[in-house]
Image (cartoon, grey):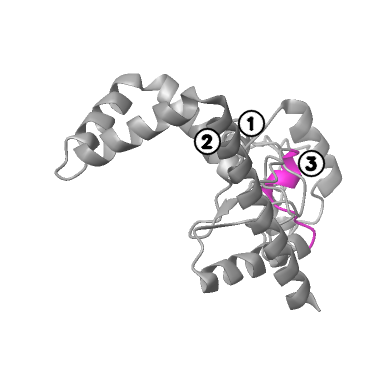
Amino acid sequence: MSTWRVSLFPPYVPPINNSMKTRTDWKTLDELQTLVRELGIASRAQYETWWRATKPPLCPGTPYKVYKDQWPGWGPFLGTRKKGTSFRSPRSPDGQKVLQAQALAKLRGDKTYTVDVPCTKGHLVERRTDSNACGECQRQYSKEYNRRNPERVFNNVKRWQQQEGRERTVQTSRRRYVVVRADPVLWAKHLADCRNRYRKRAERAKREAQQVSA
């Protein structure tokens, strides 16, 4: 007499090993890099949002841990910044050069310094000694902020001008600017002085950097 067995449960399927510590079948770094660039992911936050929403089986949620030995940084990984051009990577040769120039500027007491390394957006201009911020990036940010918040900027300027002891300074600066800007000779001399000042700072910083590297 034959007996029938009826299984009330589906056949057992082993779970997919999704552990970062033991899994070895992840996509390669180049494959994942190509995928995220095709999707147009431009920041770490966008990558994490995309990963939580789709949970791709072969893409890690924390690639900087999975590819720890090959990880170039979020900017180079997403294609938004070239490797070694940022002052935020002190381990790179360019980062070391920026840090040396900043240290020399701090010793001299300068508020700004120049170095022959572009910022993350490719600007080769003076940087702030206290924060390493690019002067051109700050000008662009301020211009965009002023365009978007005209009322707030106007109120801040009025509040600053109304503080005690600054009314005379503001009037003197305005009067001097009006006089210099109206005279083409004085204005050309002012621009030439600014260019010479920046050129001398750049030459001095270059000489000191060469002395440190030697």
Q: Is residue 13 among what the camera can see?
A: no
Residue at position x 70%, y 36% from top?
56
- Residue 125 falls left or right of residue 170: right
Residue at position x 58%, y 52% from top?
127
| Numbered disc 2: secondary structure | helix
Residue kind at label 1, given as amino acid type: Thr
The tally of labels here is 3
| Numbered disc 1: secondary structure | helix
Question: Disc 2 or disc 3, which is closer to the eye?
Answer: 2
Q: Residues within 10 Å of mark 2 (few under 14, many from 20)?
A: few
Does the residue at mark 1 contact the one at mark 3 (Cβ under 8 Å)?
no
Write down the residue under mark 1: 54
Residue kind at label 3, given as amino acid type: Leu
- Residue 138 falls left or right of residue 16: left
Residue at position x 85%, y 45% from top?
30
Write down the residue under mark 2: 139
- What x and y, as percent, mark residue 180? 47, 31
Residue 32: image tag: 3
Cα separation between marks 1 and 3: 14 Å
Residue 93: image tag: none
Q: Looking at the rendering, which quadrant does residue 163 occupy?
A: top left
The stretch in magenta equals 69-79
